[in-house]
Image: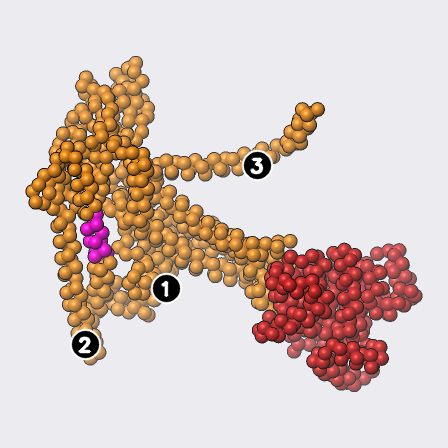
Amino acid sequence: MNPEQNHSTNTGNRQAATSRQEVSQQQIQVEAKDLGERASYDPHYIRIRNYDFFYGATQVLFDINMDLPERQVTALIGPSGCGKSTLLRNLNRMNDLIDGIRHNGDVLIDGESIYHPQLEVISLRKRVGMVFQKSNPFPKSIYENVIYSLRVAGGRRKSQLDEAVERSLKRAALWDEVKDRLHESAFSLSGGQMQRLCIARAIANDPEIILMDEPCSALDPIATGKIEDLIHELKENYTIVIVTHNMQQAARVSDRTAFFYLGKLIEYGETQQIFMNPKNNQTEAYVSGRFG
Amino acid sequence: MKDKTETEQTAKATPKGEVFVWITGMGLAIGLLMIFALLWVVLKNGIVVFWPSSVAQIELREDRDSTFRGGTTAAGVILEEYDRDVRDLTEEQLESPDQRDRRQIRFFSGNRDAYGQAFAYLMLGDIAEKTYPPEIVRAERMEWGDAIFFPLRLELADGTQIDAEDPDFRKRLRELVDEVRDRRQVINRIERREIGRINLEMRSIEQDLRYLGGMEERTEAQEREWERLTHRLEELRGDFAPLEARAQELRATNRENRLHFRLVTGEERSHHLGEIVNFYYPNDMSLVAKVGLFFFHIWEFLSGYPREANTEGGIFPAIFGTFVMTLLMSVAVTPFGVLAAIYLREYARQGPMVRAVRIAINNLAGVPSIVFGVFGLGFFILFVGNWVDVLFYPRSVETNTPMFGTGGILWASLTLALMTVPVVIVATEEALAAVSRGVREGSLACGASKWQTIQNLVLPASLPGILTGLILAMARGAGEVAPLMLVGVVALAPNLPLDTVFPFFHLERKFMHLGFHIYDLGFQSPDSEAAQPMVFATTLVLILLVILLNLGAILIRNHIRKKYAASAF
Ligand SMILES: Nc1ncnc2c1ncn2[C@@H]1O[C@H](COP(=O)(O)OP(=O)(O)O)[C@@H](O)[C@H]1O
Ligand SMILES: [Mg+2]
């Protein structure tokens, strides 16, 4: 494909994405139905190209090439230490904090390189939210936790903040449980609620992408079920990349699955295909539980 | 059955081989013991200053040649009784079958003006009898320390005499002494506040006049200023005179009445009541009255101004100076320490350079404090202070009366802040390091900048740790004496660093400090024996003040901790 052409298509998409935020949720659903399934969404929303990554002298990712579709859930699976988290944390450049990192290749979101010198990391992170393995609410009230991203962006209007809190908590399926105690400490919540609070926090400033690094690994089955339902809802509006250790979870929540092994992308495709009909022996061995 | 379970339980409580429980426990016990011993010694020696102890009248045995100030009667507060050093004993005393011939008492006889000394020693064996006559009086005086005597009569201004046997005597004396005290307070107010203020302004005008007078030629504006200042000086002199006269008049009134008394040696003396601060009958007082007087003495000590080369009166200016200096130090040290720690921990690239800086900081904490005093003198006073004077107070340089170019409470606080900054840096760094990575990453993932993350999450979470550092810094700074002697502490400061004269804070002023006060009492006072209990009492106050300041910081810290209590997981 001609890269020039490619770029212009993406710009068009980008504008659509901005205006999209202004229309209400219902309209989006209607729109989605009208367009028939998700076929209209950009299947190459996130492009990872020839990507190598090094911690100091150790290379942990080897020549990764994959395209992640817009508004779908992509699961990254693979045995511990294979580089899933590293890849995920590079999508919002969280790894920049670590000394001595280095990369080759490129990552493009909606056609723009995340390493573009003109792009500020802060604005990238506003577009790419993140939910961590260990829920990390701030030592503040529930309300302040949710609007943290708006506050640091300078948001001050009370009506706007109130609205964002309600919207985010509703989307995170937490509103009914906490609407009467928004000003209590976030630490008064249960583990599952805290993780949903972190999700609400991640979506409060309307990012385009949500990265989730084993978001359920510390939760009980009921809380896990709730988060999975939530992921299902969220993909209407957000592109989701999720790292998981749990094969059933990947099968349940994701549209596409990527299997990593020792820093290499072994197989990537429709979730159904990866689980039912893997092409690679290692993939088959892993998804059928024979190693990992 | 029951016995068995019990032995099992005890066996469980002290498992075999846990010898370290004992060793560590012993370490703690020794530490605690030393602290309590320290407090006990200070308390025991300091408290006696305030307690109105009974006064014993001591009759010496006629058959011995031991005497007290030429006679055989002594009176005083017995302070201690102990075995005299064998080397100081005579043959006879050594061989005497009576143990009491080898024991000695030390007592406070007062009347330093009459006896030359306020303390005396007697052998226990030389004492025939001790009595506690109810009519004996102990009086606190403006000079010469306390007096102990038998009152004879009051001689009033109009010539009337009231005999000590008169049933009205005590009441009259009390009334008159109270009146004297009230008048003295008025005098104090006039002299300290009003005359003090006029004096300050006069000094500053005189300085300006000296400056203007020393000039070869004066501009018109300067000529006008000269006029204005001379006029103002006249005005102030005019204000000054009546105040001075009023104080003199009150003083004269205080001198009108006289108290005649007899010492235990038989000598008759007298004081005008202006000399007497307070009096009491120590052997004729109920316990309640004694306790009341005890607390009154403590109050006077804490709130009063020193007299007689600091050995008498109160220590209020020293308490105040210590307090203000410690607060100023905290205000100065916290931002510096915290900012330095944030840079070191959050921004600087961790490497050999930062490690070297860290080692240097830690070593700074071990530098003897006097070195900081020398630095403060060289840098703050002689360099910074001089420049402040040159730039903002050129006249003070011209007339050689430096404002900031000499020791003062500001420079002392900054010197101590410099000395304690490593403590704050180390504590803050630890607190910053303890803030979990999860919270930082969560914040960055929300699109917060590094500084926003520090400001919104890292600093609030580190506040308790920072306060711990500040507490340690205060504990070290408040007790420091040596460096202060170079940068502005004095034994007797005429004015507090904070008063009602504009601009209220006088950071350039010299100040008094409890630590230095102790040193001054213990080593510089003419009568070190009289000063000894005051040394302990002042030490007690210093300890209490440091504890109080720390307690304040601890309360604030606990409050903050509670706020962030759950963030610990
Ligand atoms: N900060 C780091 N510094 C150096 N090596 C790291 C760091 N983080 C992860 N690694 C290494 O990179 C490899 C991939 O780690 P990670 O991406 O966390 O794996 P996964 O999430 O798949 O379990 C592992 O071998 C791990 O030891
Ligand atoms: Mg991982």
User: Do we see residue B126 in this rendering?
Assistant: yes
Q: Report the residue at 69% width, 27% height from top.
A: B5
- Residue B405 on image: x %, y %: 31, 62
Q: Secondary structure at mark 1?
A: helix
Which chain is in red here? A
Q: Report the residue at 23% width, 65% height from top.
A: B201
Residue labelled with disc 1: B384
> Are marks 1 and 3 in one subunit?
yes
State left or right for residue B238 relative to residue A116.
left
Residue A250 belongs to the span the image colors magenta: no
Q: Is residue A21 above or below residue A201?
A: below
Q: Amino acid at mark 3?
A: Thr
Displayed quadrant of residue B461: bottom right
Residue labelled with disc 3: B24
- Residue A122 on image: x %, y %: 64, 72
Tag count: 3
Q: Main SS of the magenta segment? A: helix
Residue labelled with disc 2: B223
Density class for disc 1 (Cα within 10 Å; few <14, some 14-19, many ≥20) is some
Q: Report the residue at 19% width, 26% height from top.
A: B73
Q: Which residues are magenta?
A: B181-192
Mark 1 or mark 3, earlier in chain? 3
Q: Amino acid at mark 1?
A: Val
Residue B186 belongs to the span the image colors magenta: yes
- Colour displayed for chain B in the image of the structure: orange
